[in-house]
Image (tube, coloured by chain):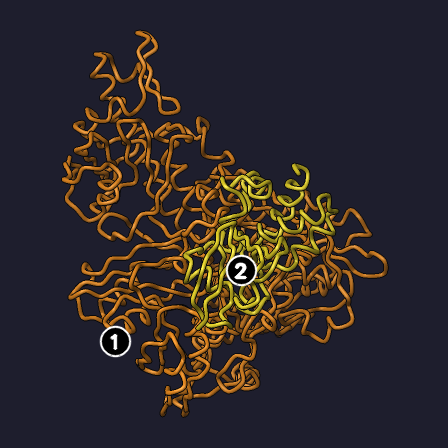
């Protein structure tokens, strides 16, 4: 496969020699139109590579350093990105070292973690980077040996010309390679020749993680830096006055500073600040709507019946279809707000010196961190550097830069380097939640039980578009109306792993189960019937690939022995999100008189699987995440403050609550798509549908354990 | 403020802190041992698990004043070369996603296996139920504890 490396001005490869004799290959996104050689000034290969922000560097020793530009938060990008580069390079993986790159918007594109988009975005670019390096190394070897490059083979970092018996490792040719131009056309490997991609490669940071090395933002320390903790105002309130005399009296507290409606206690270590923060006496007054969960419930009811909705999709004539219906099925579903709750609480280091600002910490959007700091300080963005630490989870929380903003404000106020630290209470009460949403579904069925009309109306609290209007079942039904209302709540919201679909999928897939029951159809058959319609007579725009929906659904039915064992009550859920297709079946068996959730079978089509270990991790982790929040987790408000302030009341799923999870991946032949999110959305629906099959109880709200329909079910969870 | 003499990872350490300071913050802020993690601060999640005289203990709620005369072991001191059977099993199974909770998980598992070298899967579940992993690596944690128990 040949590919043009000069596809656009923002996308070409760049090569540089180093004064230490090494080779650097990187992309340049904003520079001139042709690759050029650049000799850098510093001495040390690694330092130069870091400066250059290369995708890879090769030292004269043959050691390969590959840079991972995107923040690593557990999605395994720091392992899977370099695998792709090393594959095309034909490197010896044992000789590859991986380093986290710092923010550099000039050299890297889309340097963020979100939307399960890194791999689909970078797949081609990473391959080209590896292929370019291999090309110049082979050309250098060919020139050295006086042979034709076509006669040269590369394997595991060794370049060989078998006819002459000559061979050497990469390092021997890097100096010469640095003077060779990268051609416009580069040959990429045939996928069937892949040796690294598709094989189980372990986490490159494993050793550091398991021995407690400093890696995360919260671990960062610099001599002389201060610590700060911040008290924020309840939602819809502002500070009227405060008394900090008791807080200041705590030994170890050096300053108390206010910015906006936040008050920061500053000191030389964390514990005194935790005590001092509790001693702040702050009076708040309303500054907008001071909301409670009861208000949200009322607002949902009102807006669902009388609110003015935005029409997101309209096919055919829904009113007519519902008039003509032999049967109408209707149901409403609701989910609560949720916090992201990454294990590592928010934190960031900021150091302002003159018109420059240094930022270090965990962020999914380093460029947003930079822009935020630049704006607050009134300095050019290029004067702000961002070092990306490993992230102790993200789930969308660290897409926001609110805590970076705080670090900059405090650093500015105290004129000293500072690391701000949130505790768990801050994290659960500090905002940026998955929005609470309510949906109303209606289906019109004809006398054969076929869906002739479908309506979906979503009401969300600061949720934006609560629907995914071009997702299934749109396209499969003649008459469709999809509407959305976003209520302007004072509770701040943010993308939360698989935004919107993390609940929409559960509601929709549960509703389809209700439709199947009403239509007297098997849930698998109902879906296959709809897919066939979408495939053969599509209505309007389809945001999904019907064949891939069919394939995962059929495979999930097969792998789960769908309907084959009358003793096993099953729930199906199939969802397309973030470019990937995932079907899940939950199995409930009666054991000792109790319905027992035994296993979840998942079939995923995410295109080619780059790393089976990472892929399994993401699918199982997504299912555990989806299950935990559907089953147990709730965040409710009283006068603008969450009632659940820590893990004693904000319940997360634990070891004993996870069933067996069997994962399967379909080889669909597509390039890899993202996997950080797509396995989560279907899970709630699979479990709810299995619970219905086993008990006849339909769970239309989350978390399940707080629903009255669930109160006497006594669901057990057991692994084999 | 008072002076406390602690034995951490076999070494004697002296710190001047308030007596209610949790061990977690003594380790992290005063001794630079940041492998022990802060997450909930109320003994709910296990990220801060260390060994006090061999027993898995939540360091976030353990005041420094209660620790004189005890042997404290943190993730940094679990083994010299990171080759404790539990650490090796964690590597072999490739447990971590974000990795933040894993030091606490490893310390929990190591103390548990010392007490119960050949546990059943149910006993593993019971022991490890004290620690939260937000990424949901529970299956692998379970597998790794089982593997470590076999290599004991």
Chain painted in orange in the figure: A
- Where residue A98 sits, quadrant-wise, is top left
Q: Which mark is residue B48?
A: 2
Write down the residue under mark 1: A413
Query: What chain is colored yellow?
Result: B
The residue depicted at 35 percent of the width and 43 percent of the height is A99
Q: Position of residue B54 (x, y in %)?
A: 62, 53
Q: Position of residue B6 (x, y in %)?
A: 51, 59
Q: Residue A253: which quarter of the image?
A: bottom left
Left or right side of B32 for B147: right
* Residue A622 visible in image: no
Query: In this rendering, does residue A442 appear at all?
Result: yes
Mark 2 vs mark 1: tell me if same chain. Answer: no
Residue at (47, 57) in percent of width and height: A393
**Quadrant of the frame with the N terminus of chain A:** top left
Name above or below for residue A395 compared with residue B124.
below
Viewer-side residue, A491 vs B62? B62
In the rendered structure, the answer to whether residue A374 lies left or right of residue A448 reads left
- The local secondary structure at tag 2 comes to loop
Q: Nearer the viewer, residue A171 or A549?
A: A171
A681 up-or-down from A292: above or below: above
């Amino acid at each position: 496969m040949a590919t043009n490396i000069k596809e656009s001005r923002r996308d070409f490869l760049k090569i540089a020699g180093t004064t230490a004799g090494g080779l650097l290959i990187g992309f340049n996104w904003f520079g001139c139109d042709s690759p050029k050689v650049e000799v850098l000034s510093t001495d040390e290969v690694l330092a130069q590579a870091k400066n250059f922000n290369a995708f890879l560097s090769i030292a004269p020793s043959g050691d390969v350093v590959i840079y991972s530009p995107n923040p690593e938060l557990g999605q395994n990008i720091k392992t899977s990105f370099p695998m792709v580069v090393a594959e095309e390079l034909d490197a010896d993986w044992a000789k590859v070292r991986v380093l986290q790159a710092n923010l550099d918007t000039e050299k890297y594109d889309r340097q963020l973690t979100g939307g399960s988009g890194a791999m689909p975005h970078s797949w081609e670019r990473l391959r080209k980077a590896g292929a370019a390096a291999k090309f110049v190394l082979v050309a250098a070897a060919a020139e050295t040996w006086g042979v034709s490059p076509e006669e040269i083979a590369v394997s595991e970092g060794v370049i060989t010309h078998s006819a002459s018996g000559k061979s050497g490792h990469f390092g021997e040719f890097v100096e010469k390679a640095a003077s060779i131009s990268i051609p416009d056309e580069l040959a990429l490997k045939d996928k069937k020749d892949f040796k690294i991609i598709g094989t189980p490669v372990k986490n490159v940071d494993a050793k550091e993680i398991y021995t407690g090395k400093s890696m995360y933002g919260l671990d960062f320390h610099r001599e002389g830096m201060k610590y700060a903790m911040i008290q924020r105002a309840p939602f819809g309130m502002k500070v009227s006055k405060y008394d900090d005399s008791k807080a200041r009296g705590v030994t170890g507290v050096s300053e108390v500073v206010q910015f906006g409606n936040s008050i920061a206690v500053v000191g030389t270590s964390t514990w005194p600040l935790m005590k001092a923060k509790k001693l702040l006496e702050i009076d708040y007054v309303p500054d907008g709507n001071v909301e409670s969960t009861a208000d949200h419930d009322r607002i949902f009811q009102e807006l669902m019946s009388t609110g003015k909705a935005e029409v997101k999709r309209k096919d055919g004539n829904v009113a007519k279809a519902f008039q003509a219906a032999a049967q109408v099925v209707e149901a409403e579903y609701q989910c609560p707000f949720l916090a992201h709750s990454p294990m590592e609480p928010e934190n960031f280091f900021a150091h302002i010196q003159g018109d420059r600002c240094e930022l270090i910490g965990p962020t999914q959007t380093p460029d947003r961190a930079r822009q935020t700091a630049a704006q607050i300080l009134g300095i050019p963005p290029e004067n702000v550097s961002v070092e990306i630490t490993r992230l102790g989870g993200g789930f969308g929380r660290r897409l926001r830069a609110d805590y970076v903003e705080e670090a900059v404000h405090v650093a500015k106020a105290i004129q000293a380097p500072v690391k701000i630290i949130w505790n768990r209470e801050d994290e659960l009460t500090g905002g940026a939640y998955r929005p609470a949403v309510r949906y109303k579904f209606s289906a019109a069925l004809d006398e054969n039980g076929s869906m002739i009309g479908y309506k979906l109306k979503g009401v969300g609290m600061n949720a934006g578009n609560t629907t995914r209007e071009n997702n299934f079942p749109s396209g499969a039904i003649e008459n469709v109306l999809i509407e959305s209302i976003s209520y302007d709540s004072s509770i701040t919201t943010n993308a939360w792993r698989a935004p919107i679909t993390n609940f929409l999928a559960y509601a929709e897939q549960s509703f389809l189960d209700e439709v199947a029951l009403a239509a007297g159809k098997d849930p698998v058959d109902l879906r296959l019937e709809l897919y066939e319609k979408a495939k053969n007579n599509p209505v309007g725009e389809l945001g999904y690939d019907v064949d891939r929906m069919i394939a995962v659904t059929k495979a999930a039915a097969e792998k789960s022995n769908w309907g084959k064992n009358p003793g096993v009550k099953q729930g199906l859920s199939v969802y397309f999100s973030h470019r990937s297709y995932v079907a899940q079946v939950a199995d409930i068996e009666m054991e000792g008189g109790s319905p027992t959730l035994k296993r979840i079978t998942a079939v995923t089509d995410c295109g080619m699987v780059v790393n089976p270990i990472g892929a399994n991790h993401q699918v199982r982790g997504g299912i555990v995440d989806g299950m935990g929040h559907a089953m147990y987790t709730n965040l409710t408000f009283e006068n603008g403050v969450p009632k659940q302030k820590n893990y004693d009341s904000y319940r997360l799923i634990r070891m004993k609550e996870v069933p067996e999870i069997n994962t399967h991946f379909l080889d669909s032949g597509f390039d890899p798509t993202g996997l950080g999110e797509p396995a989560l959305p279907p899970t709630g629906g699979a479990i709810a549908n299995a619970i219905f099959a086993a008990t006849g109880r339909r769970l239309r709200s989350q978390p399940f354990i707080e629903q009255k329909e669930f109160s006497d079910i006594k669901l057990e969870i057991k692994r084999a | 403020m008072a002076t406390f003499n602690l034995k951490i990872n076999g070494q004697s350490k002296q710190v001047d802190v308030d007596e209610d300071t949790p061990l977690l913050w003594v380790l992290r802020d005063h001794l630079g041992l940041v492998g022990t993690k802060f997450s909930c601060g109320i003994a709910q999640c296990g990220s801060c698990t260390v060994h006090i005289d061999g027993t898995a203990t939540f360091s976030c709620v353990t005041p420094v004043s209660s620790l004189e005369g005890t042997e404290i072991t943190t993730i940094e001191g679990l083994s010299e070369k990171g080759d404790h059977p539990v650490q090796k099993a964690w590597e072999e199974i490739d447990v971590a996603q974000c990795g933040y909770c894993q030091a606490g998980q490893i310390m929990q598992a190591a103390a548990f296996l010392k007490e119960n070298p050949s546990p059943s899967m149910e006993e593993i579940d019971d022991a490890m139920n004290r620690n939260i992993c937000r990424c949901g690596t529970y299956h692998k944690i379970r597998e790794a504890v089982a593997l470590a128990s076999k290599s004991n």
